[in-house]
Image (cartoon, rainbow, N blue to C red):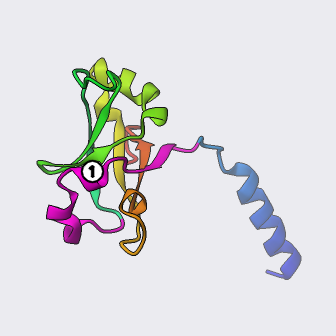
Amino acid sequence: MDSNETHQLLDEEMWDAKWEPSRHLIDFHIAGFTYYDGLEVINELHLGTRVDLVGEPDNPYDPEAIKVMYHDKKLGYVPKDRNSQMSTFLYYGHGDIFEAQIQLVNTETHPERQFRVVVKIKDNRPGLK
C-alpha cells in the first residue's frame, strides 16, 4: 500500500466514525475544603479518585447544596454558583447518572484550590461498559 492509499484509507475511517457528544458536565474546585474532613483523608486523594455527590436540600445557606464526599468524609461542596442543574437531578433521585472524580491535585496552593473535581455523565449504553 503506498502513501496515497494509506491517506485515503485514514480519511475514509475518519468519515465513518460517529460523532459523540462529550460526557463532560462540569468541573470545579471543592468549596469549603478547609472547613470539613478533607485533611483526614488528604493523603488518599489522588488524580482519578472517585468521589460522591450528595444533595443537601436541608442546608440552611443553600437548598441546592451538593456535598462532595469521599467514603464517609465530607470534603466540601460544589460551588454555589455551579450546583443548580445537578441539584435538580439529585433531588429527583437521578444521582446515579453522574460519575465524579478528582481531576487536579495541587497541595502547594491555597486549600480552596487544592482539589478540582470533574463530573461526567455515565455512559450506560449497552455493550460499552
User: Which sits in the foreground, 125 or 122?
Assistant: 122
Q: Which residues are magenta?
A: 22-47
Residue at 25% of width from left, 25% of height from top?
A: 59
User: Which sits in the foreground, 32 or 84?
Assistant: 32
Local crowd size for mark 1, using a 10 Å CA cut-off: few (<14), some (14–19), many (≥20): many
Does the magenta-highlighted stretch encompass residue 62? no
- The location of residue 115, given as percent across then percent down, is 38, 60
- The location of residue 31, given as percent across then percent down, is 37, 47
Q: Which residue is mark 1?
A: 51
Relative to residue 93, is residue 115 drawn left or right?
Answer: right
- The location of residue 51, given as percent across then percent down, is 27, 51
Q: Is residue 9 above or below residue 60?
A: below
Does the magenta-highlighted stretch encompass residue 28? yes
* Quadrant occupied by the N terminus: bottom right
Residue at 40% of width from left, 71% of height from top?
A: 106
Residue type at tag 1:
Val
- Looking at the rendered structure, the number of numbered marks drawn on it comes to 1
Residue at 41% of width from left, 37% of height from top?
A: 125
SS at badge 1: strand
Residue at 11% of width from left, 48% of height from top?
A: 72
Relative to residue 38, is residue 81 drawn left or right?
Answer: right
